[in-house]
Structure formats: C-alpha cells, structure tokens
Image (cartoon, rainbow, N blue to C red):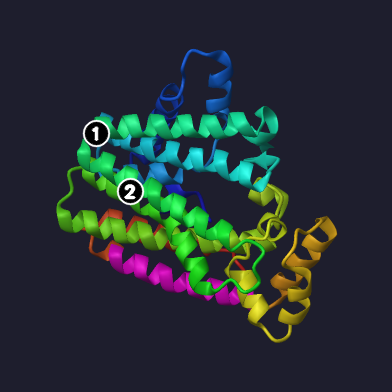
Amino acid sequence: MVNPTKALGLPRLEEGLQRLEPLLKTSVVTGDAFLDDVTTHLIAAGGKRLRPLLALATATGGARPAADEDLLGAVAVELVHLASLYHDDVIDEAKVRRNVESVNSRFGNLVAIVAGDYLLARSAAIAAGLGTEIAGLLADTLGLLCQGQVAEVRSSFQVTRTKDDYFTAITGKTAALMATSCRIGALTGGANRDEVEAVTKFGQCFGMVFQLRDDILDVVATDAELGKPPGQDLAEGIYTLPVLLALDDPDTGPELATMLGQPLAQPERDKARTIVAASPAVAATVEIGRRYVAEAEVAAASISSPDVAAGLARLARSLLEGLPG
C-alpha cells in the first residue's frame, strides 16, 4: 500500500493530519503522568492514521481547511481504533505493535484493558459533542466491533471455520469502523444524504479489502513490514481467509490441517506460513479483494466531487498493490 495521503491526492489533507496529531494527544491527556504515558503510548508510535484520513477526506474533500468538527470526528474514530489495538494485543499476548513494545507488554494486561476503555470513553465524549446522530453511530459501531471480535474468538483453533464466519467477523471488527470513519466525515462536512450513503458504502468495501490485505501480509510479510511478528494469527488459532483457502486445497490442505487446531511454536508457525504462502490461496484472496475494490470504485463514483471520487478509488486500488497474485 502506498502512502494513503499521496494515494488520495487531495490538497490540504496533509495540513489536516498535522493539526490532528496534537489534538489526538491532548484528547487523552489527564494530568496523571502514568496514565498519560499509557494512553499516548501508541499515539507517539505514529501510524498511518488511515481512519482519520478517511474522515477528513470525506468531510473536506481536501478543498478547504478542516473545521473543528471535522478534526474532532477524526479524533473520535482514531481513538476507537487505538482502543481496539490495546484490547487486541491483550487477547493476542502481543509483544510488539508499530515497531515498539506493546502496551500490555510494557504496562501489563490490566492497565492495557483499562486504558483501552478510557480511550473509548474519550471517543464517546467527543462524539457526544458532535451531536446525537454521530454519538449513536459511534455507539452502534462499537457494538459491531465487539460482535466481530467475539465471532473471531469463538472460532479460534477451528479448522472447520467457514468462509462465511470469516467474512462476518471482519465485517464487524474492521469494515464497520472504516465505514463509520467515512460517514462521520460526510456528516461533519454537511454532505447530502445520498453522498453520506455513498461514502459509507465505500468505507465498508474499503474495510473489507484492508482486512484481506492485512491477512495476506500476516502470511507473506516480514517483521519490519508488519511492525509486529508475522504469522501471529496462525499461532493464536485465528484462521483467516488465506489459511481457510489453503485448507480447502487438495495439495496443501491435508498437511496444513495436521498442524493447525492447536497453538504453534515458532518453527511450526513458520512452516505453516510457508505452506499457505506457496499455495494458490494467496492469489485467490487477492482476487476476492479485487471484487471489493470494484465495489468500492462503484460507490466512489457516486460522490459528487470528481477529485474525491478519483482519490478514494485510487486509495482502494492501492491496497492490493505489491501483493502476490
């Protein structure tokens, strides 16, 4: 994936992101030195800021400076994302996130969970200040995130996990927040209802492609590319679409099935990754991603601004660039 700001190609977005960073940090600072260290840990580590970028792009089109409401909407969605990372890393017992020590590893699981809850509380407070529609939207999105996570955890270590189960999980845990990021931007930007629905549909499809890409990279990428150890999903029993398709393949499925269904040590994890990466499953997953990209392009084409429509379509296509197949 290329730099998302460059992929969008919209003026003034970089300026909006620069204004976002200090606001993001101050939104979680409490005055308690220890808690502030915890709540700003991943903010300081950086990141693509993809969800705020979507919110700012759909709010302003890059054609005007971001208003206070636009920036606050972008902060609200990023805080939800950060909170989900705090919680995910506890579940996964992760040690590294964004090339720095994970919050749970540095501060402990209990602190990571409570700090993640605090980020969600701050997001909710900011959303409440933006009006009842946005507050309700964010609350509904939190519910979808939880449903998606439960669906994923429920099927852990199950080699019989279905592709429908997988898509149900990622619709909730990833695509919902991408869609909400786009929708909140359109709402704070004063878009008409047709436009709001168009960008929401784009965000939903974009989120599906984003997760498919992430799941491919977990199989084929390096530590440096991911910012965390690859193969973590395999080791933790989260069998993503490339793994499920490799299990269905008559050539790779039987051997892979004998390895899965249990936690994997590093040698077994590496071997399982190699089997999946060498199978047709990765190319098949990329092809499914292309279908969602096509849907995202159709949704983007309904947006009234040609620059925004073209930028969003370009961003969606960039997700699959450089992937095998």
The image position of residue 10, as x and y in percent, is 34, 47
Q: Look at discs 1 and 2 and give the one toward the viewer.
A: 2
Extent of the magenta region: 280-299
Residue that carries the numbered disc 1 in the rendered image? 130
Whether residue 184 can be seen here: yes
The answer to whether residue 262 is magenta is no
Q: Quadrant location of residue 126?
A: top left
The residues bearing labels 1 and 2 have C-alpha atoms spaced at a distance of: 15 Å
Q: Sequence-wise, which precedes: disc 1 or disc 2?
A: 1
Q: Is 259 drawn above or below residue 75 in the view shown?
A: below
Q: Quadrant location of residue 243?
A: bottom right
Instruction: Specify whether 297 is left or right of 157.
Output: left
- For the residue labelled by badge 1, is the local secondary structure a helix, a strand or a loop? loop
Instruction: Specify whether 91 is left or right of 313.
Output: right
Tell me which amino acid carries mark 2.
Answer: Asp
The image position of residue 99, as x and y in percent, is 67, 39
Whether residue 325 can be seen here: no
Instruction: Specify whether 68 is left or right of 90.
Output: left
Residue that carries the numbered disc 2 in the rendered image? 140
Instruction: Specify whether 35 is left or right of 233.
Output: left
The answer to whether residue 281 is magenta is yes
